[in-house]
Amino acid sequence: MNHPVSNSNDQQRNKSTTESGDPGPLRGRVWLTLQTLQARRLVSGRRGSPGKPQIFGLTIFADRLRVIWQAARDDDPYADWWLIKIHEALESKGQRLRSIQQVLDERLMPMDAIEVSVATSERPFRTPLRFANPYAYRAAHLLANYDALVRTALTAHHVGVLAHRASVEFIRQGSHEIRGLFSLPQGYRFLRIDRAEFRSNGRRACDAKRSMGELPDEVLSGERRAPMAPQQRRRSSGFADHLALHPAPPSAEGDANATGNDDA
């Protein structure tokens, strides 16, 4: 009689995995696909040079946001204040982009006997996103909305329902909204402060007020925080530590030709 061959090490490993208790961390993979050069340029931004101001891209935005996110975990009230500003900017700028998109969509609708499909790229830009906070992903989503706006504006000009100058203006307006969001975290200064420092009126608290202004009372007290603000480290239970989706490690697929963004 033939018996299946088994490896005792494999059996022991499987038994250990089954009986170890808690499962490991969740892993997820997210990709951003862009089809226009205008949106692609806003991923990395542009270095400043004589006559050309710096443009902050998604990468720099996410990197700076990582600092703010970690500081908010450590009870920095200014980090909380900046997360509120970023949340509100995402809401208002998202609404503005939707309004522009609606105008463009309406320009393409009344074309009798002609069905228009918005142009797409033959070689779209695709990059993995490895962020560890939701606001960085929301910013990437907003950039994707801008990408769709650009495609619609260019299509409308191509089929003759929008003048070149008008299509350029719509694209410029959308870019202005995105660039305004991406520059917002640059006003934050990481000074290693927390609310205890403010209660004692320490030196770093005074420096923070000079460089970033006075805080609203409800933010300083901790009563008001951004809807997606991180849970602070100072808590009695570690339960929330297990409720997180972690970025998956890079894979060979696409990573060799794509620029990833790490936001630990």
Image: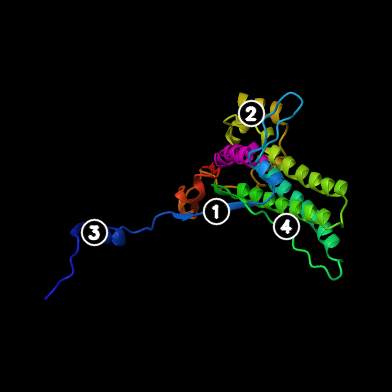
Q: Position of residue 21 (x, y in %)?
A: 33, 59
Residue at x-position 27% and y-position 61%: 14
Q: Label 3 is placed on what type of residue? A: Asp
**Taking the image as drawn, is residue 219 in sight?**
yes
Report the Cα–Cα distance between label 2 and label 4: 52 Å
Task: Answer few, some or many: residues within 10 Å of disc 4's Cα (few below 14, many 20 plus, some between 14 and 19).
Answer: some
CA–CA distance between discs 1 and 4? 24 Å
Q: Is residue 159 above or below residue 72?
A: below
The label number, if any, that marks residue 205 in the structure image = 2
The 10 Å Cα crowd at callout 2, few under 14, some 14 to 19, many 20 or more, is many
Which residue bears the numbered disc 1? 30
Closest to the camera, between mark 3 and mark 4, is 4
Q: Quadrant of the N terminus?
A: bottom left
Look at the magenta stretch and give its main secondary structure.
helix
Q: Is residue 79 above or below residue 50?
A: below
Q: Is residue 9 left or right of residue 46?
A: left
Judge whether residue 196 is colored magenta: no
